[in-house]
Image (cartoon, grey):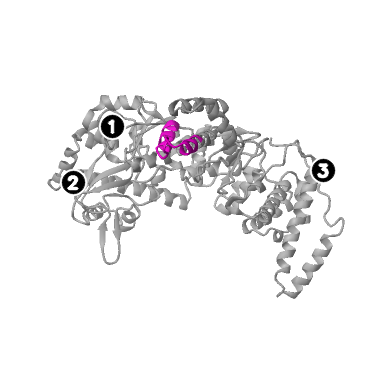
Amino acid sequence: MRYSEDLIQEIRTRNDIVSVISSYVKLTKKGGGYFGCCPFHNEKTPSFHVHPGRQTYHCFGCGVGGNVITFMMEYENYSFQEALKALAERAGIALPEEEPDAEERKRIGLRQRLLDVNKEAATFYAKQLYSERGTRAREYFAGRRLSRDTMIRFGLGYAPQTSNALYQYLKTQGYSDEIISQAGLAKITEKRITDRFWNRVMFPIMDSNRRVIGFGGRVMGDGEPKYLNSPETILFDKSRNLYGLHLAKRSRAGHFLLCEGYMDVISMHQAGFDQAVASLGTSLTEGHAALIARYVKEVVLTYDSDGAGVKAAMRAIPILKAAGVNVRVLDLKPYKDPDEFIKALGADAFKERIDAAINGFLFETDVIRSGFDMNDPAEKTAFYRQVAGKLTEFTEELERENYLVSAAQRHGIPVDGLRKLVRGAGYGIVLNEAVNPRGNVFPAQKTAGGRDKKKAGLRSAQIQVLYFGMQSPEAAGWVRRELTPEDFPEESMAALAADLFGLWSGNTVPDAAGLIDRYQDNEPLRNAAAEVSAAAFPDDYRYPDIARLMKENVKRMKKDRIDRKLRDPSDVKAFQEALKDAARLEKPGSISEPPDIPWNGGDE
């Protein structure tokens, strides 16, 4: 389905990028922009920049970037049309009723057939559970003290011992080998057809709209692996779905109970705790945290009480905090998991443990303390320093002070002494690698991956000259006169420059969000365009400073091109031309004066 450029622009304009992204990512205003932890990679220092004036985002850590449409595409795994539809609905814009094009019809049709075959498979597994063949599986669930109502509520089932029973059934229902395979329900080769799940009790996995998108299965007996999930499909992304979410999202508890396994979720729901969810056979991810943040602002971790559970909690706490979710940790001891606890002590005792759950930060300090000998003065001091280091993660002074006092009281640390340690450990508390104290963005300052200063400076020069060219037709014309795409050593930047030069030659100077729209299907170019769109000059720069910077950038880029040519003497003609260019570059006036641009300093 194709929509007009005017309609696309209206949808973008009516959906403020800060408002949209802040519903997924916790953003903090710094200068003229907003920063948060990137939802597309794991990081502790916020380097994800959202620019309200340009309606773009860019991560200085992993390099992703785009506008509000590309964010929805990347985050929600939407197609371009799906992202437009979601944003149009959000803005109250009625999309024209048009027939989808052939490609879109094919994609929609495939998605629906996969949902249909998963639903059919869930029905098959449920019928098997209540058949004669499912006796052993029913006994297993009965042994876990699950009621029939609970089993029906979660759609539990059984995959029989016959290794292709589901495949044979689905074929009778008219499903093709291709659909069965793409749904991850069977492995189909020339020699053999085998169901992915057999001789297992089955747990259908549903999305937030109660549609079956995958399965988890526990083996009956001693087979391996004990638990098996559906493979990744266009429906099932285990890093962005939660087991039990379709039920928990309707809970009035105001928080989620986050646990590790299917049975923990089911046991808690049966005991009346309808706010329980679990990640799907994987550690908690940023995608999980962002999904949780859409529904609640607090999570109580109910991970296993063993060493592995403690490690999982320590990993999950900062991820949830980065998403803006407050964390508390439930003490399950002496029991291993919620299922055991509830069976032993009942729902009332479990409710008391929820109410008494410890703050996530204090849990972290407790775990850190367990690794030190507090009778040894040196180790005791080292522990205090680690607590001080943790406190520097709080960027708001009042919040940091509250946690400082609580930690000091909990661990018997003198408050004034801990405060001094924090000041010593936290010179950069309100800063990060992507911003200076004014909040201005300087791409060259971030040398991710150990990039040397020369290469970082060259990349900064490319970004800044293209950004300069986007400010006005006169600036664009100057950049085109002084440089060629060959002056851009990085492939994506060279391609972006070539495209921009073509636009500028026709006196077209697209805005940042509009430029990104050109590269919906080209991620390297889209990220390059986002990086250029995210650039900025310091607040106190005016025309003389900007002009000087632009001339320095152009000279640096031309010199790099000449050096690349001189390093390859095999092409004699090019080598000689490079020598002439080097001589010309050193002459006064070799680079013309850049035009003044409509600039009021800093971010808009």
> Which three-letter amino acid code belongs to the residue tagged 2?
Gln
For the C terminus, the image quarter is top right
Circles 1, 3 touching at the beta carbon (< 8 Å): no
Q: Residue furthest right?
A: 588
Camera-side residue: 255 or 495?
255
> Which three-letter amino acid code belongs to the residue tagged 3?
Pro
SS of the residue under disc 1:
helix
Q: Is residue 326 visible?
A: no
Q: Over which residues does the magenta segment extend?
A: 360-384
SS of the residue under disc 2:
helix
* Residue 556 in the figure: left or right of residue 67: right
* Residue 284 in the figure: left or right of residue 582: left
Question: Which percent across, then down, holds residue 64?
Answer: 56, 48
Residue that numbered label 3 is attached to: 544
Camera-side residue: 18 or 297?
297
Question: Which percent across, then down, holds residue 340?
Answer: 24, 35
> Which three-letter amino acid code belongs to the residue tagged 1?
His
Residue 128, labelled with which disc? 2
Question: Which percent across, then down, holds residue 369?
Answer: 42, 36
Q: Is residue 492 visible?
A: yes
Q: CA distance from mark 2 to mark 1?
A: 24 Å
Q: Residue at x 29, y 44 (%)?
A: 119
Say whether residue 156 is magenta: no
In the image, is residue 150 above or below residue 70?
A: above
Rate crowding at label 3 as few (under 14), some (14 to 19) or many (20 or more) other CA atoms within 10 Å. few
Residue that numbered label 1 is attached to: 269
Rate crowding at label 1 as few (under 14), some (14 to 19) or many (20 or more) other CA atoms within 10 Å. many
